[in-house]
Amino acid sequence: MKNKYLYIQTFGCQMNVHDSEQMAALLSGNGYKLTDNMKMADLIILNTCSIREKAAQKVYSQLGRIGKLKEQNRELIIGVGGCLAQQLGTKFHKKVGHLDFVFGTHNIHLLPQMVLAIEKKRKKITEIDFHKSLNSIGVYVPPPADAISAFVTIMQGCNNFCAYCVVPYLRGREISRPSDDIIEEVKKLAGNGIREVTLLGQNVNSYGKIFDNGLNFTSLIKRIGKISGIERIRFTTSHPRDLSVELINCFAEEEKLCKHIHLPVQSGSNRILELMNRGYTVEDYIKKIDHLRKLTPGISITSDVIVGFPGETQKDYQETIDMMGKIRFDSLFSFKYSEREGTAAQKLKEKVEEGEKLRRLEQLQILQDQHTLEKNTSLEGSRQELLVEGKSRNSESDLMGRTSSWKIVNFKGELDMIGKLVDVKISKAYLHSLRGKIANN
């Protein structure tokens, strides 16, 4: 029997990366093996994102290239999933004639039967319905033999309806996964050598709100912390409005919870935050940051900022710059505002000119680079515990690990250290990484 090969290209966030892993796990039951060579593939899936226009443009460009492969191999099956697929549905078939199937964010579990139907009948398929229970959220992904970290989805969807964001429309309303299912998955991962798990959700702080048993996100973290073999717990992403005192305390109380939080602020202007429908003020946000740093000294704070939101004046932008000076983030994901169809922000007037957006973005990124280097330099001479992930990308003779605070450290070490916790002394700081030496015990 001829081997069948699957090529998946992922656009967007960590949740999409894990969705792609689940797709591959499901399709292995149909006899498909993953390949990183698109020209070898019998089935190609693009797992899309539509948070920003640039991501959507990349998808269309790639589909154009894939169309040429289909001209050479009429048996090639091409599918599109994810947020852009959810948004366009049947329109995707009209835009891209060589597509075989389109499936939305609630329909990953239907992949095996969709692909089988196309193999037999060569018909075009669209599946974009939302479901009350999300069958694909708990698909188990067997980790590779050398893996030490894994993603675990604990919830999907969002109820916040920020003015710029399409997630509630494309991922649906919040659905939390039963905690016992999550615990069983993490135990299984630990039994397969996984030492670090990252809990995924559009707003993990809201985990468990639909349950009647009182189990919330902090309780879930503490349950996972008791699982033998798991050394570290991370999570993403949090909404500042829902960051509770209980979860802030958890960073100090739960030894396995990594000392890093990604907390998207989006703007330093209260006027813009209100237009964005974020539900907090800059003062609220800074108060929570101060509380985190007081209870957990050295905690790494990373964030997101959007520049050029409709109505953002130079004064609003300067307030964002001033906020950055007060907080001094460890790192920052920053973007020009990208208008998305169907969002409340699309109706706002006073659009910021593209050239001005770019100017503001470049200025902000230069400032953040200064803050990041400042934060990294402050670690020179300190002793840091790393989870060693593997060989360094920079040098075959080096290993690479991460601190609890999400800093990359390159160092000289033995291969048997991979997957273990080791102590290093930081000798040199750079913008995107640190240099270390094995510490004397």
Image (tube, rainbow, N blue to C red):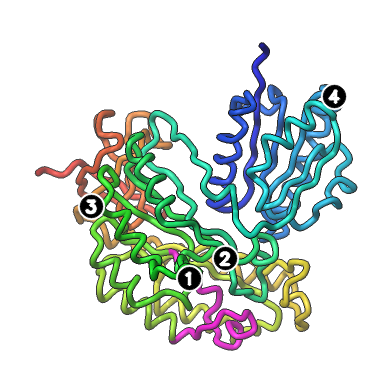
Residue placed at 60% from the left, 26% from the top?
A: 35
For marks 3 and 1 on the same chain, the one whose residue lies earlier in the sequence:
1
Q: Amino acid at mark 2?
A: Glu
Q: Secondary structure at mark 3?
A: strand
Q: Which residue is mark 2?
A: 174
For marks 2 and 1 on the same chain, the one whose residue lies earlier in the sequence:
2
Q: Amino acid at mark 3?
A: Gln
Q: Quadrant of the N terminus?
A: top right
Q: Amino acid at mark 1?
A: Lys
Q: State the separation of the CA atoms marked 1 and 4.
A: 48 Å
Q: Which residue is mark 1?
A: 209
Residue placed at 69% from the left, 73% from the top?
A: 356
Q: Amino acid at mark 4?
A: Arg
Q: Secondary structure at mark 1?
A: loop
**Residue 208 image offset from top left, x and y in percent:** 45, 66
For marks 1 and 4 on the same chain, the one whose residue lies earlier in the sequence:
4
